[in-house]
Image (cartoon, rainbow, N blue to C red):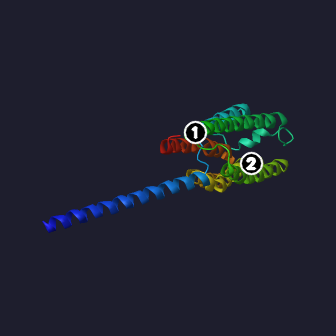
Amino acid sequence: MGFRFNFVVQSTFKIMIMNKQKEQLDALQEIRSLMERNSRFLSLSGLSGALAGLSALIGVVVIYNRLGISFSEPFYYHFMLNNQGEPDASKTTFMVIVAMAMLVVALSGAAILAKRNAQRHQLPLWDGTAKKMLINLAIPLAAGGLYVVILFRQHHLELIAPATIIFYGLALLNAGKYTVNDIRYLGVMQIVIGLVAAVYYEFGLLFWAFGFGVLHIIYGLVVYNKYGK
């Protein structure tokens, strides 16, 4: 009788300890979740990445069609020059318009889907973390934009596509600490693609399509399947 009583007491005590430990683990997980919400911008949508990638691919197709060349034809930037060997104004303006259209589509899609995710998960759309993320994203992008202007003015058209990929990758890597880690992996891959494009610059626009188009679509689908957003 005494043995059975001791056994019941010990079992009850063990259950109480296990329940206490479980409560502590649950509390730690909740604290970790709250800290992550406060330190990371979690409303980014994978679908917006896929949309940006799709618009980039469409833009490249439009540009190749405007230049009147096939995808397998190297030295695409030669077809952007006029008879004097300088950038053709009409073709350059057209490419800038296409690039701006792609940027508007990508940013609009990201903003709309981020707002939807924020409302669905009851997360703030704009807070200190979002501000830090945008600042860390904007600095390398601004530096890259100025560098592209310098390259254009010096007629180094062959290096513009690789430069945009590299600086974009640096921007993602820099901003990745304020959002999902997957975006940092995308940044590293963009930097690698940009460096390869700098070596094989005659096909730089195709590498641009792969970096901004294909990789974005893959990233978007991965994030969507991983986080359901």
Residue 187 in view in this figure: no
> Which one is in front, 65 or 212?
212
Residue 136 visible somewhere in the drawing: yes
Q: Which mark is residue 135?
A: none
**Is 27 or 10 nearer to us in this picture?**
10
- Decide which of tag 1 and tag 2 comes sooner along the chain: 1
Residue at image coords 71%, 38%: 103
Front residue of 218 and 76: 218
**Amino acid under disc 1:** Asn
State the SS at label 2.
Answer: helix
Please state the horizontal and vertical placement of residue 90, each as a whole percent of the image. Answer: 82, 33
Amino acid type, callout 2: Ile
Disc 1 to disc 2: CB gap under 8 Å: no
Residue 121 at x, y percent in the picture: 55, 41
Q: Nearer the viewer, residue 28 or 41?
A: 28
The extreme left residue here reads 1
Foreground label between 1 and 2: 1
Marks 1/2: CA–CA distance: 35 Å
Residue located farthest toward the right when viewing the structure as drawn: 84
Numbered marks: total: 2
Please provide percent x and percent y for residue 86.
85, 42
Quadrant occupied by the N terminus: bottom left
In the shown orientation, is residue 101 left or right of residue 189? Answer: right
Q: Residues within 10 Å of mark 2 (few under 14, many from 20)?
A: many
Vertically, is 140 above or below 75? Answer: below
Which secondary structure lies at badge 1? helix
Identify the residue shown where x is 52% and y is 41%. Answer: 224
Q: Give the image location of residue 108, x and y in percent.
A: 68, 35
Q: Which residue is mark 1?
A: 117
Q: Is residue 50 left or right of residue 14?
A: right
* Residue, disc 2: 160
- Does residue 222 lie above or below 178 as drawn? above
